[in-house]
């Protein structure tokens, strides 16, 4: 049940009208009726981050299960195959998600938020993380591999992510990705 409720938060943060606006703006709307329309794929990709480590189909099952729980989804609908989910993500591309982040990533602290201010100055923090990415030639060329004792380097290419966060709320306001050597 908590998984289904977590997905409800996604819909509150990324309102349907905002998602539709971003899809239209980035020209990512599907050209024909599909089992996986662009709006659903946007929410699905966000859910993939929320349920990191879960199988693709399981994340979709949780999304649809939550919608079925509140009677907002057709009961006969079946979870697509991992291949169909992957193709839907490729069709969508990164542009709508990047634009959605730009639109939704805003400061959240109010003057009453504890730990968010030093006098009139908003407190911000910079932090980073490295993530393994799929072992493809394109990813290796774009991001590189970490150093290791083997000639080819680490087991997987890695991307470095650096974010700017608001201290009082932990809201991420900006993020950049780059090669592991950055």
Image (cartoon, helix red, strand yellow):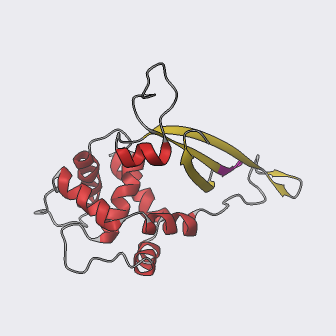
User: Quick one: 156 or 1, which is closer to the camera?
Assistant: 156
Which quadrant, please, contains the C terminus? top right
| Residue farthest to the front, as pictured | 151
Please say if 107 is above or below 58. below
Instruction: Say whether residue 83 is left or right of residue 179.
Output: left
Image location of residue 73, percent across then percent down: 22, 66
Where residue 55 appears, x then y in whole percent? 26, 42
Q: Give the residue at x 28% y 50%.
A: 62
Magenta range is 164-169
Q: Is residue 62 above or below residue 75?
A: above
- Lateral position of residue 103 relative to residue 34, left or right: right
Which residue is rendered at x = 40% and y = 58% of the image?
Answer: 8
**Residue 159, magenta (yes or no):** no
In the image: residue 92, left or right of residue 140: left
In the image, residue 64 lies at what x, y percent? 25, 57
Does the rendering let one see residue 169? no
* Residue 167 shown in magenta: yes
The residue under the point 23% across, 64% down is 71
Q: Is residue 143 left or right of residue 156?
A: right
Residue 130 lies, with reference to residue 174, above or below; the image says above
Q: 51 or 143, which is in the foreground?
A: 143
Question: Depth check: 17 or 114 in front?
Answer: 17
What's the residue at 24%, 54% (across, down)? 65
Is residue 5 positioned above or below 53 on the image? below
């Amino acid at each position: 049940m908590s998984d289904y409720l977590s997905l409800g938060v996604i819909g509150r943060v990324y309102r349907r009208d905002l998602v539709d606006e971003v899809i239209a703006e980035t020209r990512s709307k599907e050209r024909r009726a599909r089992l996986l329309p662009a709006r659903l794929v946007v929410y699905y990709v966000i859910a993939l981050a929320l349920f990191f480590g879960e199988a693709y189909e399981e994340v979709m099952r949780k999304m649809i299960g939550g919608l079925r729980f509140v009677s907002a989804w057709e009961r006969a609908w079946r979870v697509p195959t991992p291949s169909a989910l992957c193709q839907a993500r490729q069709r969508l591309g990164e542009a709508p998600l990047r634009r959605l982040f730009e639109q939704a990533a805003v400061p959240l602290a109010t003057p009453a938020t504890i730990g968010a201010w030093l006098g009139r100055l908003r407190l911000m923090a910079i932090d980073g993380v490295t993530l393994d990415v799929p072992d493809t030639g394109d990813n290796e060329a774009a991001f590189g591999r970490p150093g290791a004792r083997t000639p080819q380097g680490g087991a997987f290419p890695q991307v470095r992510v650096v974010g700017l966060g608001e201290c009082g709320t932990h809201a991420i306001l900006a993020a950049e990705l780059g090669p592991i050597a950055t």
